[in-house]
Image (cartoon, rainbow, N blue to C red):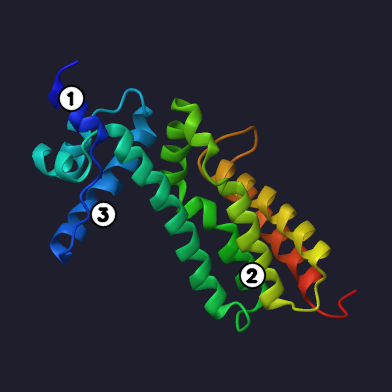
Amino acid sequence: MSSNNANRKVRRAVKPQRSHGKARVETILVAAAEVIGDKGYDRATMAEIAERAKSPIGSLYRFFPNKEILANALLDRYAVLINAAFDAIDHVASDLPVETLADTLLELMVNLQTETKALASVLEANAKWTKRPKFPELFLQRLIKVLRHRAPELSANDAQNVAAVLMHNLKTMRAITFGKGIATGPDVAAELRLMNRLYLLNRLTPNRK
């Protein structure tokens, strides 16, 4: 292996300081998630990612000297996206009708599908990445926080149980939306949406029978 390649592997991603550089990095990460989600981590190339991002290859390597560094940035970005989505919900959870809150939560994994596919491919490609913080656990804890914020009377145990059910519903909605599994389609999605609303109404509405 050449010394140049060795040096490239140990370099860290350059942190952009200006808005233009930050926007370029975000564009690259979005493109990387799309390419890796479509082709898988092992088959995706830096050249394809640069082309998808409409970025010079040299600019990509400046911020991400190799694909492993880029993958680490994608994992970090996924956690940021999850937290940002839940932060937005936290700000309005107490004012939303329960039905609206139920729909908003149900669409979370659907809205993150591109990043989720890339994440799964990255984690499958390298065992060491599975030692990072567990994203399902992050999702679960953020769901619990929303539930306790919306319904403070929920016990910690009840909130965890409700959040676990919601996690299954979120995964099912993602599978239905993207055609995975036996039963898919808009009618099935509508039924799941209704079921999810009724479930949260039952659990989050005081004195509801």
Expressed as whole percent of the image width and height from the top left, the position of residue 161 reads 79, 57
Decide if residue 140 is on the left or right side of residue 165. Answer: left
**Who comes first in sequence, dot 1 or dot 2?**
1
**Circle 2/circle 3 CB separation < 8 Å:** no
**Circle 1/circle 3 CB separation < 8 Å:** no
Instruction: Give the vertical position of 195 relative to 187 (above or below).
Output: below
Dot 1 falls on a residue whose secondary structure is helix
Give the Cα separation between the discs numbered 1 and 3.
25 Å
Residue drawn 67% across the image and 76% down it: 149
Q: Is residue 125 visible?
A: yes
Decide if residue 166 is on the left or right side of residue 30. Answer: right
Residue drawn 76% across the image and 71% down it: 201
Instruction: Give the vertical position of 181 relative to 149 (above or below).
Output: above
Give the Cα separation between the discs numbered 2 and 3.
28 Å
Q: Residues within 10 Å of mark 1 (few under 14, many from 20)?
A: few
Q: Residues within 10 Å of mark 2 (few under 14, many from 20)?
A: many
The residue singled out by tag 2 in the image is 146
Dot 2 falls on a residue whose secondary structure is helix
In this rendering, the label closer to the viewer, 1 or 3: 1
Give the Cα separation between the discs numbered 1 and 2.
46 Å
Residue drawn 17% across the image and 66% down it: 19
Which mark is drawn over residue 26? Answer: 3
Which mark is drawn over residue 5? Answer: 1
Instruction: Say which quadrant the N terminus sits in.
Output: top left
Residue drawn 88% across the image and 80% down it: 207
Expressed as whole percent of the image width and height from the top left, the position of residue 97 reads 64, 79
Expressed as whole percent of the image width and height from the top left, the position of residue 99 reads 66, 71
Q: Is residue 185 visible?
A: no
**Circle 1/circle 2 CB separation < 8 Å:** no
Instruction: Give the vertical position of 186 relative to 91 (above or below).
Output: above
Seen from this angle, which residue lies furthest bottom?
A: 95
Dot 3 falls on a residue whose secondary structure is helix
